[in-house]
Image (cartoon, grey):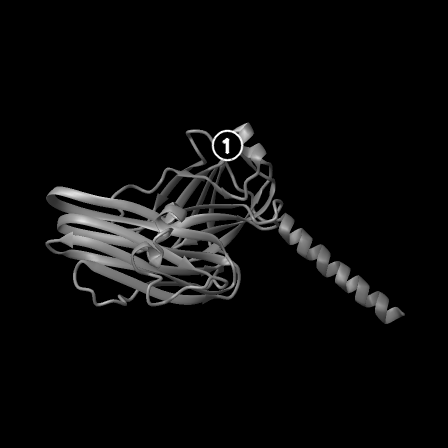
């Protein structure tokens, strides 16, 4: 009996220490900055609820700078209050042809009341603030309205992360480039595929990017070709589609974009896609990224 009481007292002490440690997570401020040159996260705490606008100024103010094939920032709720963890994500890459977004908004989960009120409330509590890096410095500055002060964070924990140049898997000549690759998440995570096209004399370009998770069935020989191998895909998956661009007269062009799955389940994820182009000369490439949250 005495041994049991000692065991229970020890467990209670350990749980109390863990709770205290979480309560001591450093608080986010009105201007919250995170910096790093590798992929990982810092522990942060929202001391009070934060209201995020869902109107024309969607999201929180953001200043994102860095370089690489894919870089960015993400905020993930530690203990879900809506079934799935609340996520805010913003990514970019060299040669996208536009500046990084100056807003970072919630990706969900959403409720009807969010849109009726025109705002999304981040509950007070614990979060992980992630840097996504390609070996070069990344800096993100997020503005939390209604909160005072400035706080700067560096990474507390590095996470498993794989970022690769996807290999070309077809030999259809210069007009069609098809790419594919796969990797495995050990925990819940983020999966991304990014397309990048650069040409000194671009005539036409169309890009389709594709993702397949652990529970998705797909035909490897066609799944990464035009429309991801499905003629109905263009209608079904407009989120991951970029319309064709026609240049007349032919002109210099550089453009990139990324598709992100922020609630990727553990298991194998295959990513890739196709670039259909008519160009005098140029570079056509795709990158795949897999990041474990744990």
Q: Residues within 10 Å of mark 1 (few under 14, many from 20)?
A: some
Report whether residue 38 is seen. no
Q: Nearer the viewer, residue 291 or 16?
A: 291
> Residue visible at 20% across and 65% down?
172
Instruction: Please determine whether, in this image, residue 92 is positioned above or below residue 174.
Output: above
Report whether residue 160 is seen. yes
> Residue visible at 37% across and 51% down?
232
Left or right of residue 35: residue 7: right
Q: Nearer the viewer, residue 293 or 253?
A: 253
> Residue visible at 53% across and 62% down?
187
Left or right of residue 124: residue 160: left
Left or right of residue 12: residue 169: left
Q: Position of residue 190 (x, y in %)?
A: 46, 56
Instruction: Please determine whether, in this image, residue 166 is positioned above or below residue 110.
Output: below
Q: Position of residue 102 (x, y in %)?
A: 37, 37
| Total marks in image | 1
Q: Position of residue 177 (x, y in %)?
A: 23, 60
Q: Pick out the residue farthest to the front.
A: 231
Left or right of residue 125: residue 143: left
Q: Pick out the residue farthest to the right.
A: 1
Q: Nearer the viewer, residue 220 or 189?
A: 220
Q: Which residue is mark 1?
A: 145
> Residue visible at 25% across and 55% down?
275
Tag 1's secondary structure? loop
Q: Position of residue 92 (x, y in %)?
A: 34, 48
| Quadrant including the N terminus | bottom right
């Amino acid at each position: 009996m005495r041994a049991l009481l000692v065991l229970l007292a020890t467990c209670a002490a350990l749980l109390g220490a863990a709770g205290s440690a979480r309560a001591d997570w450093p608080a986010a401020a009105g201007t919250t900055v995170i910096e790093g040159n590798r992929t990982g996260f810092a522990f942060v705490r929202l001391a009070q609820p934060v209201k995020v606008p869902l109107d024309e100024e969607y999201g929180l103010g953001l200043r994102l700078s860095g370089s690489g094939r894919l870089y960015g920032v993400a905020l993930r709720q530690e203990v879900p209050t809506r079934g799935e963890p609340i996520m805010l994500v913003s990514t970019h890459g060299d040669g996208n042809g536009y500046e990084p977004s100056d807003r970072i908004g919630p990706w969900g989960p959403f409720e009807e009341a969010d849109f009726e009120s025109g705002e999304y409330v981040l509950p007070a509590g614990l979060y992980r603030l992630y840097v996504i890096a390609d070996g070069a410095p990344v800096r993100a500055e997020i503005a939390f309205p209604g909160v005072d002060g400035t706080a700067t964070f560096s990474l507390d924990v590095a996470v498993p992360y794989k970022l690769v140049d996807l290999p070309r898997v077809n030999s259809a000549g210069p007009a069609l480039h098809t790419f594919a690759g796969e990797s495995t998440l050990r925990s819940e995570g983020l999966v991304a595929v990014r397309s990048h096209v650069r040409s000194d004399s671009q005539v036409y370009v169309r890009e389709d990017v594709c993702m397949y998770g652990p529970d998705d069935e797909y035909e490897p020989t066609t799944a990464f070709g035009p429309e991801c191998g499905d003629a109905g895909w263009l209608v079904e998956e407009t989120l991951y589609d970029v319309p064709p661009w026609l240049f007349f007269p032919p002109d210099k062009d550089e453009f990139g974009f990324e598709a992100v799955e922020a609630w990727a389940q553990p298991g194998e994820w295959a990513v890739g896609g196709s670039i259909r182009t008519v160009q005098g000369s140029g570079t056509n490439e795709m990158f795949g990224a897999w990041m474990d949250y744990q």
